[in-house]
Image (cartoon, rainbow, N blue to C red):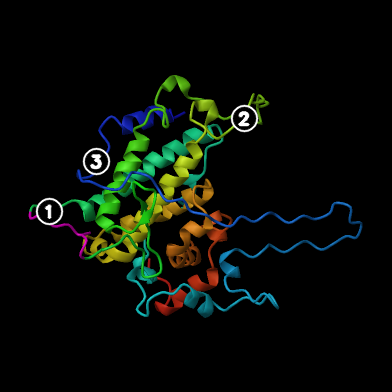
Amino acid sequence: MVNLKKRNARFREHKSPTSPTQQNPQNSLPSIHSLETSPGYTSPTLSVKLPPIKNSLSLAETIGMDPNNGSIPSAEEVLASYHLPQVKPQWLNCNYGKHIVKGNFLTLSAKPKTVEMGEWIAHQVVDHWRMLITFIKLVHDREEDGSSICNSRKCPKMSAGASHSFTWLNSRLQPVEIPAYEYLSLVQRYISGKIDDSNLFPTDPAGVSFADNPAFCTPLPESGPDWIGKRSGFPQNFMETCQTIFRQMFRVYAHLYWSHFDDMFCLNLEKSMNSCFSHFILTATTLGLLKKTDLEPMQPLIDLWAALGTFPQGCKAYEIANISVGHLLIQKAGGPPSS
């Protein structure tokens, strides 16, 4: 059994990457409000034997659904609703959506049965941050002449295409648009600070707990309020903080794809970034760390990867994808990519 707290502690033996010292707005994050739906209810008292209920439509499939007749829009109509530029981004061509490895990334995201959920989420946060920071440094770190790939001239705001931009809260808790370079500096400072906080991510191996396996034992009832990670010493706001961290990491990935994919391609790193990001999406959706609304800037790529089989059927990433749009993108690229 891997001691995840020891692993997290080893991850943090070296100081977390720090961003350049500069005066920035207060290190607080904007909140995202999303719609919540409640599940339907079927009365258990019905005596008539009914045929099996068909699987409900995924959220992506219901975009633009006609409220009068419930008709589903065509793939072309859904793709148009994404408001993509006339010249589609390079990463939406399936020939550039390849990975460095083949296989099911879901096996890397699903929690092992005997690992406590808080421990697993903490491990995933640290692991995905270590992968993402590599790509951040490529575009953020300055060269000897003081220039950087991501700069205020090329990226005057933190955006993911023309339809999505991200703000940061200043010291008066007002959302403000700032250059992407400055946003990346704040994200590094925020996430590194959270991971290095032993009150939020405890590293004492003595506090490690394991999930009960119902096949061999009966879980003991918890006393008082319960939350994810409580048994291993994680605070009550642990899950909320991890969701915020994942939301910020997603925004960075979205900016990298929309504004710097050509830079990654020139460095021959597009397959590496594809591999890290598809793994990230599977983890975020499997563990409930991102909501459907958070993923909107990269929905077309999620559709494409689901159609290509990167996201296996049955996983949550596949369920939120519009497969018809994915197949349409493949068709526009001239067919599936060669292996």
Instruction: Residue under label 2, please give it.
Output: 225
Q: Position of residue 145 (x, y in %)?
A: 7, 55
Question: Which stretch did the figure color magenta?
Answer: 145-153
Disc 2 crowd rating (10 Å Cα; few below 14, some 14-19, many 20+) is few
| Residue at 34%, 46% in the rendered image | 171
Q: Nearer the viewer, residue 22 or 338?
A: 22
Q: Amino acid at mark 2?
A: Pro
| Image mark for residue 143 | 1
Whether residue 275 can be seen here: no
Asked if the residues shown at circle 3 and circle 1 are in contact, with their CB atoms under 8 angstroms apart, the answer is no
Whether residue 333 can be seen here: yes
| Image mark for residue 18 | 3
- What SS does tag 2 mark? loop
Disc 1 crowd rating (10 Å Cα; few below 14, some 14-19, many 20+) is few
In the rendered view, does 211 fall on the left or right side of 56? left
Q: Position of residue 118 (x, y in %)?
A: 50, 34
In the rendered view, does 324 fall on the left or right side of 13? right
